Image (tube, grey):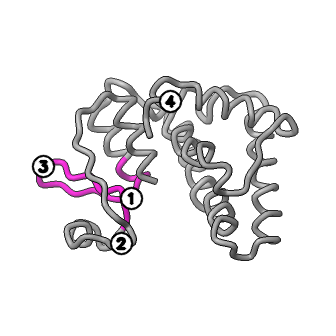
Amino acid sequence: YAHRTRLVLAEKKIPHELIECDLKNKPKELLDLNPYGKVPVLVDGDAVVYESAIINEYLDEKYPAVPLMPKEPLSRSRVRIWIDYCNTRLQRAGGNLAHGYEVEKSAAELKQYLATLNGEMRDREYIGDNYSLGDITYIPFFVRLERYQATIDNSLPYLKAWMDRLLARPTVRATP
């Protein structure tokens, strides 16, 4: 999830200091900042913001020069729906597979979720009308397909074309 926020920071060219931490041995500083004990955490002056989707919207609102959300409310809601889809469906099923939990059920779900995305991307270049936080949300999943035991190939042509466009972006190639 921190990868998503690094992508937003890169797209918007926001100067920042990246502090890595060992999530298997969480430092007290992380736990003091975020009661969930998860990353990313954004410290902006006296403000502390956590949860990648929330951080990313905060950054988009604070630094509007490179907009990553549509202006129109209905379009914004659509982007948020696809962010939620990634977080609650795709990541869950992929995470279950990566950890060997409910493997058969999770593999079937993941296959269906990818097919749904393929259909969604049939007539689209991006999740919204333009490259957005919705697209950014999927990039870490695409980068880690092997970890999630997922394959996106020519059997999912629209999804593959979208993934290839996203992974070819200079900021994506340059952001670990």
Local SS, label 4: helix
Relative to 1, 107 lies left or right:
right
Relative to 153, 52 lies left or right:
left
At label 1, counting other C-alpha atoms closer than 10 Å, the crowd grade (few under 14, some 14-19, many 20 or more) is some
Q: Residue 143 lies in magenta, yes or no?
A: no
Q: Position of residue 52 (x, y in %)?
A: 41, 53
Image quarter where the C terminus lies is top left
Q: Nearer the viewer, mark 2 or mark 4?
A: 4
Amino acid at the residue labelled 3? Gly
Q: Position of residue 88 (x, y in %)?
A: 60, 62
What range is drawn magenta here? 38-55
User: Along the polypeptide, which appears first: circle 2 or circle 1?
Assistant: 2
| Marking on residue 51 | 1
- Spatial CA distance of label 4 from label 3 is 29 Å
Local SS, label 1: loop
Amino acid at the residue labelled 2? Tyr
Would you name the residue on which mark 4 appears?
173
Q: Is residue 174 above or below residue 115?
A: above
| Marking on residue 36 | 2
Q: Position of residue 90 (x, y in %)?
A: 66, 56
Would you name the residue on which mark 3 appears?
45
| Marking on residue 63 | none
